[in-house]
Image: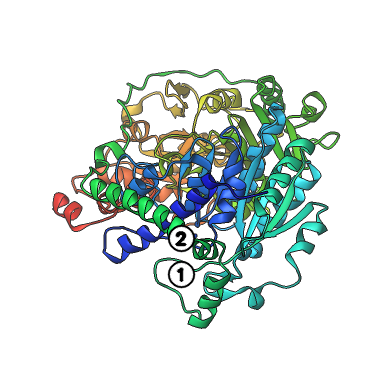
Amino acid sequence: MAINHRIIKEIIRIRIVEQAFLNLFSEGKLNGTVHTCIGQELSAASFAGQISKRDFVFSNHRCHGHYISYTKEWKPLILELLGKSSGVCGGVGSSQHLHKYNFFSNGIQGGIMPVAAGFALGNKIKKNNNIGIVYIGDGTLGEGAVYETLNFISKKEIPLLVVCENNSYAQSTPIDYTLSGSIKARAKAFGIEFRESNTFNLDNNILGEAKSSIEYVRQNSKPLFHLVNTSRLKAHSKGDDDRDEKEIKELEKKDFLNNLIESDKEHFGAIIEKIKKEVDLFIDESLDLNEMSFENYLEENGEQKKIDYSIYNLHKERQIKLLNSVFHNLMKNNNSIFIGEDILDPYGGAFKVSKGLSTKFPDRVIGTSISESLIAGVANGLALNGFKPYAEFMFGDFTALAFDQLINHSSKFYNMYNKKVNCPVVFRTPMGARRGYGPTHSQSLEKHFVGMDKFEIIALNKYLDPKIVYDYLEERTHPTLLIENKTDYAKKPNLNLPNKFKLYITNEDIPNLIIKPPNDSKITSTIITYGGSSEIVLDNIEKLFYEKDQLIQVLILTKIDPLPESFILENITENTKVITIEEGTERGTIGNNIISLIAKNNTNNHFYSLSSHDNIIPSVKSLEDNVLPSINRLMKIL
């Protein structure tokens, strides 16, 4: 397939734009970093450049060429790296984090693979005949998420084209040092169709070979792995190139674009000069444009509504029965997806939450291998594609295996892409001990997820009807980690309060529970707890009163991050004891956050915490300075 004039101009423009970025960085006009694709442009044009915008692309840190070939827009990319508010993502994402149409990029190696698989699975469920491309590098083949994904897309026959750009280096490390075996054998091991091309010389047919691979994925609704042998002519990023100059000169000699220009210097020289003038002029005009204001970067939380309290009448069912019923009702919504390991009938999950779901909804209950990173990543991709996924981790301890997908993907998409996407995924898992499961199946790890952007942590307890929580989650448009205490599953919410003690529920969007004594002016202690730990307190209120002479009120939190600050503060009386109870280890606890909140608001002293704002760190320098601790912010406190 001949390379036409349009594609030649496209790859020339990519190279000129990339070189302009290197020049701007050396002049101190770019903040952050730049990973250029100089030498790899033909790969971008061949794959991303030959699909429609109904299809999607997931790319990595070296994404500029893919972006330009897919979108056909280079000006917003320049504005983005210059940190301008009119850039692709308002200057927040910069070089590595771009989103427009169905193009997504992220700088975390390997993590985009399961997300792309989830997006492609969404297309398969929709039966829209759209496909996707995910670009990885040879260095990414060291990441376990890649192999979890290859297994998944093969078994599920997912229409995803994996393009591996092999430039023989993972940053500064040559492929021979790290990669055992062959790349081809890796794809073949999972039964995936394999093709191979290169970006060298003038007589290669990568365009035709790429088009054939695209058609294969679309027509067969199956994955394909296409290896592109290519060369990176410039540094990994900016100026960090330690390769021998002779090696680089040899690569330049066989570079497709260099040879094309050499074949007709006058003709291509004129094209280069014209495009370069256009790019340089646009950059000159853009340097003084505005960056996003800090006020626009931060989002208003809105006014807090007044909290009202009403008597709460307990339900009478075991929690597991209620949860199973909740999911049978949720799955009636065609956007709902249930994904996890061992969730299919007849087993129905380790704690039977998913019992019967796969029989009723076989296309939207997705069983997986033991692959927590995959489960989370696929759920993220489904969420980006318009679904409401509920991803189950069999034990809370296993969330550690999926941490990358939560902290570097789901929690960042919204602000990283300048509020253009939502990721309404729910990660749910049983936490806690008291079942004798030992060190790796009994931990409470929720504190390790505190503070993530747009991310909430919610803890069920056996007293609150889980339908109330899931009704809230069904409408939520950002990611959530939902904690279910494994000892509560089989229990009914039996509650024997001392005489005249009352259980109340708040009218908050996600309600909390509070138990108050008959005369709350005489409260001596307030216990604040959540999840399974609440039972310890409620079963012993009377004992605490008679043996310790303590008149106690109990706050049972549902949302533990961000904390329900108004609810906590308006129920704390000065000069009384405040005790927090949780199963997590004592350093860096949820309780520490609660005590810090109270100490800052309910004493005669003034406490301040200077830390980063609860947002992702943007690339554009003016916003970055405002998000991070700084002398200016310190001066405002003093």
**248 above or below 116?**
below
- Picture coordinates of residue 88 (x, y %)? 39, 41
Q: Which residue is drawn at the image coordinates 14% and 54% (left, top)?
A: 635
Q: Is residue 491 visible?
A: no
Residue occupied by mark 1: 235
Residue occupied by mark 2: 36
Circles 2 and 1 in contact, beta carbons < 8 Å: yes
Horizontal relation, residue 194 to residue 95: left or right = right
- Picture coordinates of residue 197 (x, y %)? 69, 59
Residue 588, picture quadrant: bottom left
- Count of residue discs: 2
Local SS, label 1: loop
Dot 2 or dot 1, earlier in sequence = 2
Horizontal relation, residue 239 to residue 433: left or right = left
Nearest the viewer among 142 and 550 is 142
Nearest the viewer among 293 and 208 is 208
What amino acid is at disc 2? Thr
